[in-house]
Image (spheres, helix red, strand yellow):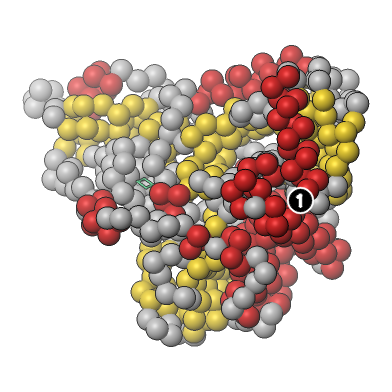
Amino acid sequence: MITRDGAYVSLWQDMPVYETQRKASSTLIYDAVIVGGGITGISTGLLLQKSGLNCLLLEAHNIGFGTTGGTTAHINTLLDTPYTTISKNFGEDNARLVVQATREAVNLIKRNIQDYRIDCEFEEASAFLFSQDDKQSKELDDIAEASEKASLKLEPIFSIPVPIPFEKAIRVEEQAKFHPMKYVYALAKQFEALGGTIVQYCRVTHANEDDDMIQIEAESASFKALKLIYATHIPPTINLLHLRCSPWRSYAMAIKLKSGNYPDGLIYDLYDPYHYYRTQVVDGEKYLIAGGEDHKTGHEPNTEKCFRQLESHVRRYFDVSEISYQWSSQYFESTDGLPYIGHLPGHSHNVYVATGFGGNGMTYSSVAAIVLNELVTKNESIYGDLFSPTRIKPIAGFADFIEHNTDVAKQFIGKWFTTGELESMADLAQGEGKVVKFNGEVIAVSKDSDGSLHAVSPACTHMKCSVAWNLAEQTWDCPCHGARYSPDGKVFTGPATRDLEPVELRTLSEKEK
Ligand code: FES
């Protein structure tokens, strides 16, 4: 089974780990190295390989370990950032360009499915957006007006496919849904068939950039490339993007209904955070997928509560027979509402990034593939300026800020702590974790389901923010830029590239006590 960055299992994980076809070379100079084996990296790799480049894709875990394995897989041009906000921040012409780019992305997915005969339970669907009070109705009117001006096809409707009371609703055509991992595996296979190389369990730690070549250092190998693309949500360096993207957690459930009345379409309410519903058939079984209860990573002290709130919301409207799966995943919001796709600020012209997709990762991953393919092969794209990460204004004093924050603490080398005392002081139930002060030191301590205690430094190895325990997924999550770690401190997701510093625990013998 595919592994992911948390304790819960998503609807998409019941697949064997992807089997790679060829070996990477550390002497060859690849045209492009892509870091990240999610839908963005693989979609981009495939387009570049089709354009005639020789690409290497490096993934720190297995393919789909991150958000691609935990998405709810809505393929839409009706976006989380409403067109009211996009028009306000970027102008009406650019809002039209966003519709054009996302439409092109949906078409790319459809074309891939057709060309490669991918069986990924893809279905075209309408999106429904509905209001439940006067304030939301006004917001819905504004969204509808701005969306129409941006040339999104929509219409007002008077019934919605879910048994939820509403005031007003609109329907948007030409959206879609699919099984994301089946799609990604098929693209990966195609990428390799065209000569691309995939290496799993290969964490990239840093890259040395020369004028005409980049040396990419991974934990157990190094590679050379002319171009480097970070498709890791947020790049593993310390960069302005870390100040312009915030990490969020989102919760989802796959539910069996007693009645068998599964709704058609992709359905969204207008709460903040909003709830969403859709039906997916997986291997012949129908599920209602419901999601929501989003919060900033590391800011919710009881993440289990988010699942319970989502469950009670769903039970209010649906005759739940069984919650078959529940899982959470992470996404990154940009400050102005559009993703950053293009040259990575502060690096050479040969280093690229794609991040800040918000809750529209399935669509923006294909937008990123299109834009990056054009930038890498032609050095221009009609969407280049719109999504350019360099639209970020430099921040005064950023260099000093980096200097100050990269010095990772090594406070526990040579020190050890007694298990018994720490355990009684932290007072943890199985599955709990806490950051505690013990014998003058701050320690992140957790107890696993077997009752074993784990202790690590809470200082995130990216820029030293203090991590917070994620009760639901049994991980240490960094609230600053979203790095996530296992209970014993192993890096699950970047931007950190190093594990949390371990804290040595010893059980005293009777004689020592
Ligand atoms: Fe940047 Fe933790 S992810 S400080």
Identify whether 26 is placed above or below 128.
Answer: below
Determine the residue positioned at 91% across, 26% down. 158
* Displayed quadrant of residue 277: top right
Q: Is residue 370 visible?
A: yes
Q: Is residue 103 left or right of residue 237?
A: right
Q: Name the residue carrying label 1.
A: 150
Identify whether 330 is placed above or below 49.
Answer: above
How many numbered marks, from 0 up?
Answer: 1
Residue 13: where, in percent of width, then height? 66, 45
Decide: few, some or many residues near mark 1? Use Cα within 10 Å; few <14, some 14-19, many ≥20.
many
Quadrant position of the C terminus in the picture: top left
Q: Nearer the viewer, residue 472 or 227?
A: 227
Q: Is residue 239 visible?
A: no
Residue 62: where, in percent of width, then height? 56, 55
Residue 4: where, in percent of width, then height? 56, 45
Q: Nearer the viewer, residue 336 or 106?
A: 336
Determine the residue positioned at 31% across, 41% down. 465
Q: Amino acid at mark 1?
A: Ala
Determine the residue positioned at 35% across, 37% down. 467
Q: Nearer the viewer, residue 496 or 149?
A: 149
* Displayed quadrant of residue 222: bottom left
Q: Secondary structure at mark 1?
A: loop
Determine the residue positioned at 73% across, 27% down. 138
Q: Label 1 CB, ligand 1: below 8 Å?
A: no
* Displayed quadrant of residue 395: bottom left
Residue 48: where, in percent of width, then height? 65, 75
Q: Is residue 448 left or right of residue 12?
A: left
